[in-house]
Image (spheres, rainbow, N blue to C red):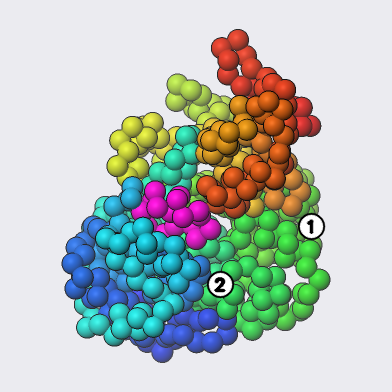
Amino acid sequence: MNCVLWLKRKALQAPDAPALLRGTRLVADHATLARRAAALAGSFVASGLVPGERVMLLSANQPAYLEALFAIWWAGLVAVPVNAKLHPREAAYILEQSGAKAVCVDEEWRDKLAASFTDVRLITLDGGEYSQYVMHPPIDVVDVADSALAWLFYTSGTTGRPKGAMLTHGNLAAMCLNYVAQVDAIAPADCILHAAPLSHGSGLYALPHLMAGAAQVVPESGGFVEDEVIALLAAHRGVTMFAAPTMVKRLARHAGWTARALRGLKLIVYGGGPMYVADAEDALRIFAGKLAQIYGQGETPMTITALPRAVMNDAAHLRFRERLASVGVPFTGVEVRVCDKAGRELPVGEVGEIRVRGGTVMAGYWRDAAATAAALSEGWLLTGDLGSFDAEGFLTLKDRGKDLIISGGSNIYPREVEEVLLTHPGVAEVSVIGEVDVEWGEVVVACVVGRDGFADAAALDAHCLRHIARFKRPKQYRFLSALPKNAYGKVLKTALRESLR
């Protein structure tokens, strides 16, 4: 079943109900949103796109982003949402690897791509031409099977090269059903506030709200601004928002809260990185009964385990702090195991690799058979994360596999940063690691061996900004005479981390 049928149904059942807002301004009811998505889908088809082809989304949050996402599915196409904070070179790689035939962009990204990609159709979401696309003769929803691709979710592998996790319509439907079963029941009068990027968790959570007929609210700023978020919570009711732990901590510390805003907030679902117990306790002092945590990956979107708000609010429980340190219990519709390297399930308390099986697990990696074979085994997703179960079935993450750094909810792979730094003539050797940070969870630290005494942090920072996204660049540079290595010449990152401590 095509997931966008949910929008078509709501347009018939509740045509006048609010569907899409910019701040407090109504952009479209369900009937209008469906009509615009059908018209944009018609323009895709008229341009020669056929079902199964990919359309990239590269834009800051705006209402037209959601219209375009729904239109892509309406036409039976595959969405490729991409982080708008990426460096143009990184975005260009995803565009080429996905084979996207069109890109829905904002004006800033149009200028970045227009000169280099003349053979790709660019659709500017915030330009005057966009109004012509949504006035095109509409088409009916294209029929697709549950197994049809819906979303290529680009994540990073052990090498740092982005890989497209192939999410089907069936995967997304399973994710939505898991959400309403274990995270929150959604009423038609509720809404979701998209202060986090639509290219990732917030965009995925647009779907269960679409299924329920709830409204989608995009901030005027298009992003996360604390004062704006609080004002929108005061203006709306039944508001859910997805947030990285850093965003939750910033909101909890903000002094501008009002009783009206807290009444408007229904739930903050956080994920994408660890939340330390002390930070969770601080947030609960403000958001008691309105916090839930999820643990997932792009390969099983938003759906491995959940720590429901009832558990997070049960401070009287004898193991409250231990539960708060966990990522909760497996979602209703998935199986989760902790296994040794041979795939044998480990007993309670033992640490091993987390594996997941169920309807949310991806079909594989786009055009990458080797990576697919390494990640999927007999229906199980090998997450690469390490954890252990307790006697009550709560899962606690012990470490992120493959040296992944999670800073502010964003995944950063050390090798990607190392490869950029090694292209600087002043760098002989480098090893990138994560250091614990109270604000960001982790920050990127580059341990550098310079050539001929080179030790210019500013030059390396400028070099990184020319080649990778700003959020991936190191926050600190440590200049060393040598990197610690084992007998085989492999850099001992554990020793580097110990030296930082």
Residue at 56%, 72% in the rendered image: 222
Q: Residue furthest front?
A: 452
The residue type indicated by label 1 comes to Asp
Asked which quadrant contains residue 9, the reply is: bottom left
Question: Is residue 164 depicted above or below 100 in this figure?
Answer: above
Residue 453 in view (yes/no): yes
Question: What segment is highlighted magenta in the picture?
Answer: 79-95
User: Does residue 167 appear to the left or right of 415 in the view shown?
Assistant: left
Q: Is residue 209 above or below residue 136?
A: above
Instruction: Tell which tag, 2 or 1, sits nearer the viewer.
Output: 2
Q: Nearer the viewer, residue 386 or 312?
A: 386
The mark found on residue 61 in the picture is none
Q: Residue at x 30, y 62 (%)?
A: 118
Around disc 2, counting alpha carbons within 10 Å, would you say few (fewer than 14), some (14 to 19), or many (20 or more)? some
Assess whether residue 82 is covered by the magenta stretch.
Answer: yes
Left or right, 75 with respect to 413, comes to left
Residue at which label 1 appears: 282
Q: Residue at x 48, y 23 (%)?
A: 341
| Amino acid carrying mark 2 in the image | Gly
Examine the rendered structure and indicate whether residue 427 appears above or below residue 336: above
Read off the residue under disc 2: 222
- Where disc 1 sits, the SS reads helix
Q: Quadrant of the N terminus?
A: bottom left
Q: Is residue 140 magenta?
A: no
The image position of residue 361, as x and y in percent, is: 39, 46
